[in-house]
Image (spheres, coloured by chain):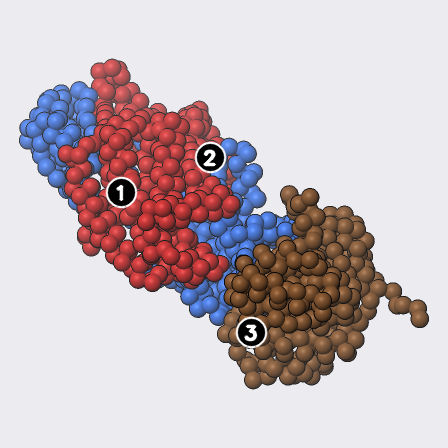
Chain colours: A blue, B brown, C red
Amino acid sequence: MSWRHLRAIIRKEINHIMRDRMTFTLVMFTPVALLFLMAYALTVDIKHVPVAVLDYDRSSTSRAFAQRTTEGEDLDLYAVVDCLDEVENLLMHGEIKAALVINPAFESDLQSLRGVSLQVVIDGTEPESGGFAVEHIVGRAEEFVGELLADQMRALDVSLESLQPIDLRVRTLYNPGLKPRIDLVPGLISMVLGMPALSVALTLAHEREHGTLEQVMATPVGRAELLLGKMIPYIIVGLVNVIVIPILARLAFHIPFNGSFPLFFWLSALFLFAILSMGTIVGVFIHTQPAALALSFLVIFFPGFFLTGIFFPIASMPEMMRMEAMFLPGTHYAVITRGVFLPGVGLDVLWPYGVMLVGLGVAFTAVAALFFRKKLG
Amino acid sequence: MEQAPPIIETDGLTRDFRKTRAVDSLDLSIQPGELFGLVGPDGAGKTTTLRLLAGLLDITSGSATVAGYDLARQPEAVKRRIGYMAQQFSLYGELSVVENLFFFSELYDVPRSELKQRTERLLAFAGLTDFKDRWAVQLSGGMQKKLALACTLIHEPEILLLDEPTTGVDPVSRREFWDILTDLYLGGTTILVSTPYMDEADRCSRVGLMYTGRMVICAEPRQIRAQIEGELIELRPDDWQAALALVETLPGVHEVQTYGELLHVFVDSGDQRLPEIEAALMEHGVAYRGIRRATARMEEAFISLIKRLEEGRED
Amino acid sequence: MFKRVWSLVIKEFIHLIKDWWMPAFMLFGGTLELLLVGWATSRPITNLPLMVLDQDQSAASRAVVVALENTGTFALEAEAPDMPTIQDAMERGEINAAVVIPPDFDNELASPKGKPTLAILLNGAESIPATAALRAVQGVISDMGEGITLRRLGLSPGAFSGFDPSLRVWFNETLSEALYTTPAELGLMLEFTVLLFAALSFARERELGTLEQLLVMPFSSLEIIIGKAIPAVLVGFCDFVIMLSMIHFAFHVPIRGSLALLLVVAFGYLLVELGKGMVISVTSRTQHQAFMLVMMIGMVDFMFTGYAAPVESMPEVIQLVANVVPAYHWLTILRGILLKGAGLDVLWPNILALAALGLVIGTFSLRYVRRALD
């Protein structure tokens, strides 16, 4: 391989990228914008969920209970209603997301130590809110009932501290409280940093459409030189975002970066190499830009979203998909970013993923170079 | 005198595209130092032929040798020895003139020591010295073509393959371009150029007419012009349709072509038929503004040939 | 005029067929993503690697481990010998949770006044599995706890059922997650594909140089716009119908409301997004640019679709802005008609808002695009 040829192609490509101001800005800026938009949408805390209360009992206990469940920021008491029809109406209009129904025998059931039944109606079209409401109500209810029963039991001279004898101590590492879901941010970062793959897929098709590829193919330039020459500038572009995005993420989301940045940088370069080589394969086979766009999405970005373990744990996937996931650079990079941000692990833990990225990159580039022919049509 | 082996030789070269046969059993033999013109109507197969010879397309059947290398087996070696210029503008618009030249010089491994000299020479040659820092997309059509030519010359190849290099260029630039080509030809470069302009064919050392993928005739311009049957009478009628209808029927008339406002009449003997035609026109009241003997040119020869071919196909 | 528009439409369709990747992707890409989303979200979280440090090694502690395994959420990775092993595994991301059973667990459990404790460590670097893990453990613990309480109180399970919340879910009885993510995905995909298609329409022609030719032909700019809009709308509408059928048949998403109303609103929404797409199309010089702009706008709308979190949980400002985002109303209507069976009487404010926005955006984009073409 001729370094002279490679340098010439890289130089040409960099000029090409930088001189198209608009596109350059977009290519640089879009990953950042996407990250922030997605991260914001996905990490918003659920609160102020509007609920209604239907109290058939109307005792002091039930009122105290209703009050207890709706105090605080999580649930907002939208209305106190008299019948189920009103509940249905409010749910239908989307004005409440859940309703608490207290049965008429609430107080007496509690006092006689019989089982207390409680009904929560939720809007199934938004289980996020609905499920949240349920958990919240159930939690508060357990506290409430527990306290009440504890008093009663003491009165009956039954020794019981609480209904829940087993003391469960929960400790969450790296993201105490599990909220907001900032752990998603590294995952999103790993997704968003792969965007240059799209540009790489498009650039070959672009040259084909504009005819510039013809002239270059008539020269003695090598296939690998051409392909690598197109990839490398975009790796550089991607690396700029590798530096900028974690800084911005720290500022905006207060997410800690506990690992070594130089390590992250070099591993990111390997990731870019791997994923851009996937984009190159698309560019080699597809001759028009819209088609290149379409295929990149199908083969790089959709799987990147679903199979890389960012949103859906790989452990839960069937065997075959787990194997497919191994062939995606995003899967390995997701582990790397996750490890570097929150736990802050080092090379000793991450090296196998780096190796996988190198392997994938080399394999994909080889496939691209093999199938790329310096011929038209 | 023994002839040197041909520098470009094809034997039954054929290229198919799905349903069409773009190049059909082409047998071509070009000597070193020739300025060979490839002419023919659109779709004749000129571009495909050039692309095949440049190693840009796969050969369907037959063989071709360029500069001693077999095209099917050693296309990359061929690419080093040739300069190819594509039909549509194929350079990088947002790179400047010198940047484009530099880019191609790198790809052709031009020795660094010679780069500056060659670049300056080529810029002067192409009249682009004053524009060397301008972006290629900002050049006029004619200058773009000259730049493209310069880029094919940077590695001083022995063979040039040029695909319609003057199409879409103003007449002055066209003339200048051909002056450059003639200079190169005189310097010993073998040039294979395709063109739709018949007058350019006249400037070649040999011309090949292609029609639906086949080479119909391949000879010196002089010989082709001689192909046309008879002598030419040029007539400027007021109503060419009437004149055409009349003159076609006259004795001794081989063929009548329209040429803008003019009618070109091919007769067996110019001296004899000219007064006859005049008389016939006046007799039938067909007005005209001029009539004279003229020399047949390439254009007429080709049109005549193609017409005969088309009539042959219709039979 | 109609003849001219018709010839343009034919030309567009010829292009579509020649470059069949693009419409194929539009029609099936969205559907594919929908499938993936539906499938992925309908799967429960299972097989999470779990480590157990059993310092008690009693029948009771083993019962806990078995109970945890039986939830299906966990796959027992290993029995850890000590804490450092667990911590190392956590750091490496090899396990999602670890349970530590203290040495006195069995004794405390057996004694009438005992307070048995259990510790669970969650890997917060992956909050989604961690939450699922926590829920599973809490479930197991609460069941065990109930059993203990009953035993200690000397009550039989029948007499004291403890605290029994019953959940009644409306509109989505099985609480299938797919039922709510797929409509959201559908709404988003429709927007995205129509936007992309429209955005590429002019940008592609400009990039390839054919736009100039089109403009010198005897078509008025309005005719050109309509000529391009018709195929986009047709393809978009087909896309919608395909995706709707898919989620209905594959994921059993019901269509409880009026299908006719839904189709009409969908059509209207298509036109709105088309308008936006065309504006992008004439402002971009290349297809690459057009695509990037579409991504960004699509993502902004993503936030407002309530896909990941309900709009009410967002700051007031954003909630106000949501009212002028067409996608917000579109999704409310979509969910309403599909899952709630809501009709005009309920949805009229959203439909009105959508229509109003449509009018404003439509007029603006029409004027803008016409001006750009002239």
- Whether labels 1 and 2 belong to a single chain: the reply is no
Instruction: Give the chain letter at badge 2.
Output: A
Quarter of the picture holding the N terminus of chain A: bottom right
Amino acid type at circle 1 is Gly
> In front: B145, or A78?
B145
Horizontally, is C353 left or right of A318 in the view? Answer: left
Q: Which residue is drawn at 19% across and 52% down?
A: C320
C246 or B123, nearer to the observer: B123
Residue labelled with disc 2: A316
Q: Do the residues labelled 1 and 2 touch (CB within 8 Å)?
A: no
Is label 3 in contact with label 2 (beta carbons under 8 Å)? no
Q: Nearest to the eye among marks 1 and 2: give it.
A: 1
Amino acid at circle 2: Ser
Identify the residue under disc 3: B170
Quick check: B287 above or below B111?
above
Q: In this view, does C265 lie to the left or right of A174?
A: left
Viewer-nearest residue: C109 or A267: A267
Name which quarter of the figure residue A312 lies in. Answer: top left
State the SS at label 2: helix
Mark 1 Cα shell of 10 Å, populated few (<14), some (14-19), many (≥20):
some
Among all residues in the image, which is located at the extreme front? B283
- Rounded to the nearest angstrom, the CA distance separating label 3 from label 1 is 52 Å
- Is the same chain shared between marks 3 and 1? no
Q: Is residue C161 above or below residue A362?
A: above
Q: Which residue is drawn at 67% across and 75% down?
A: B178
Q: Residue at x 68, y 63 (%)?
A: B266
| Crowd class of label 3 (few under 14; some 14 to 19; many from 20; radius 10 Å) | few
* Image position, residue C328 (x, y; %): 25, 45
Q: Name the residue under label 1.
A: C268
| Residue B292 seen in render | yes
**Mark 3 in CB contact with mark 1 (< 8 angstroms):** no
